[in-house]
Amino acid sequence: MTIKVGDKVPSITFKHLGSDGMEDISTKDLFEGKKVVLFAVPGAFTPTCSAKHVPGFLEHAAEIKSKGVDKIVCLSVNDAFVMDAWGKDRGTGNNILMLADGNGDFTRAIDLGLDGSGFGLGARSQRYAMIVENGTVTALEVEDGPGLSVSSAENIVSKL
């Protein structure tokens, strides 16, 4: 069943390439006691994701954090090395935490997967954004198809 507002996020461990190498970050560590904006993309380095989605959240990072958000997270069904390289390429720095859902565990658990095999992408994530407060989803915006509208930074700012 697809996650919805009012649901708790599932217990999953993400991968992140930190300064000391590969790190595990659990959903408990990420969300417990915090307000987090998480946006997910079908793939790192893909056109809409690189040209619009990540740049929008970078542009609005200070405004988002000024509304009590502890962390902005970008999630993709890519490996941690790709997410790290993409973050460096996009200049996310400390503004956006680039997390890997390499095996798609979180994406499957919240039922927001996307079959990108027609484009040679395999199993991926739909494009969405959510606000999570202390582990509970308080807002969820899932795109109906290609493009970027409801999961944009501008729309999420209006939900904070």
Image (spheres, rainbow, N blue to C red):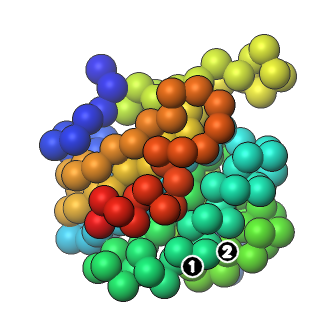
Q: Amino acid at mark 1?
A: Asn
* Position of the C terminus by quadrant: bottom left
Can residue 103 be seen here? The reply is no
* Any part of residue 132 in sight: yes
Q: Quadrant of residue 149?
A: top right
Q: Residue at x 37, y 32 (%)?
A: 110
Q: Which residue is mark 1?
A: 95
- The amino acid pointed to by label 2 is Thr
In what element is the residue under mark 2? loop
- 148 left or right of 80 in image: left
Q: Is residue 59 above or below residue 105?
A: below
User: Dot 1, crowdedness within 10 Å: few (<14), some or many (≥20)?
Assistant: some
x and y percentages locating residue 117 in the rendered image:
75, 17
Residue at 31% across / 79% down in the picture? 67
Q: Quadrant of residue 156?
A: bottom left
Point 43% across, 56% down: residue: 155
In this view, 4 is above or below 95: above
Q: Is residue 44 left or right of residue 61?
A: right
Q: Are marks 2 and 1 in contact (CB under 8 Å)?
A: yes
Task: Please state if 72 lies on the left or on the right of 137 as rendered.
Answer: right
The numbered dot on residue 92 is 2
